[in-house]
């Protein structure tokens, strides 16, 4: 009998309080080694309805595709996401998140220790933009940065302490975090060599 388990990983885009200073040699990774992974490293994703999502100078699915291209560019990994309009195990959509403070959330479904599907939901209570193409960024969340972070959760990568990581637990409005940090790459290469 296969038991289906659903886990939620949420990006909290509110103030992150860090006590003390963490140097790179003392940094600590929150990713969950040894837990469920995808059965294969190549997966399709589709963009469902983004109705009700407030956007400025950004098309959500284009930002999501750009984020996937960033993760796909890790040369030491077999991980690959491809956009499709057909059936896919990964869905991106607008909808209410579990907590009012969450701009987006990723829900992974597991069967027998393997991830079989993911849904990334972007909360319409927040607005999204392409911070690189806005005259005065800072009024909305950068859609590509949020998607890059959530796609890390699709791969079962948890939050990091490093502020340079796309997996940092907090991101200010208007901030772009579009480049993978060394540790982000290392985790992906270890999970999907």
Image (tube, rainbow, N blue to C red):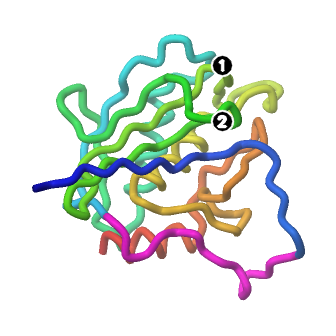
Q: Position of residue 54 (x, y in %)?
A: 62, 16
Write down the region rendered in magenta.
21-36
Q: Main secondary structure of the magenta part?
A: loop
Local secondary structure at mark 1: strand
Residue at x-position 66% and y-position 50%: 177
Residue at x-position 67% and y-position 45%: 12
Q: Position of residue 29 (x, y in %)?
A: 60, 74
Residue 27 magenta-drawn? yes
Pointer 1: what residue? Answer: 56
Image quarter of residue 46: top left
* The residue positioned farthest toward the top in the image shown: 52
Image quarter of residue 25: bottom right
* The residue positioned farthest toward the left in the image shown: 1
Local secondary structure at mark 2: strand
Residue at x-position 22% and y-position 36%: 88
Image quarter of residue 133: top right
Residue 187 magenta-drawn? no
Is 17 above or below relative to 182?
Answer: above
Left or right of 175 on screen, residue 20: right
Left or right of 162 on screen, residue 147: left
User: The C terminus appears in which quarter of the rendering?
Assistant: bottom left
Q: Position of residue 102 (x, y in %)?
A: 64, 37
Q: Residue 175 shows which numbered tag? A: none
Left or right of 178 on screen, residue 156: left
Pointer 2: what residue? Answer: 142
User: The N terminus appears in which quarter of the rendering?
Assistant: bottom left
């Amino acid at each position: 009998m296969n038991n289906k388990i659903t886990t939620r990983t949420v990006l909290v885009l509110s103030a992150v309080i860090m006590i003390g200073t963490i140097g790179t040699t003392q940094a600590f990774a929150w990713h969950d080694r040894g837990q469920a992974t995808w059965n294969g490293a190549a997966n399709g994703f589709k963009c469902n309805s983004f109705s009700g999502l407030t956007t400025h100078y950004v098309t959500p699915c284009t930002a999501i595709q750009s984020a996937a291209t960033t993760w796909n560019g890790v040369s030491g990994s077999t991980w690959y996401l491809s956009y499709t309009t057909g059936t896919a195990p990964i869905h991106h959509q607008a909808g209410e998140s579990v907590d009012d403070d969450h701009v987006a959330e990723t829900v992974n479904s597991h069967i027998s220790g393997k991830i079989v599907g993911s849904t990334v939901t972007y909360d319409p209570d927040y607005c999204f933009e392409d911070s690189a193409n806005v005259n005065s960024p800072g009024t909305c969340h950068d859609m590509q940065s949020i998607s890059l972070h959530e796609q890390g959760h699709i791969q079962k990568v948890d939050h990091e302490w490093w502020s340079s990581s796309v997996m940092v637990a907090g991101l200010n409005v208007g901030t772009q975090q579009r480049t993978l940090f060394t540790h982000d790459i290392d985790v992906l290469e270890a999970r999907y060599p």
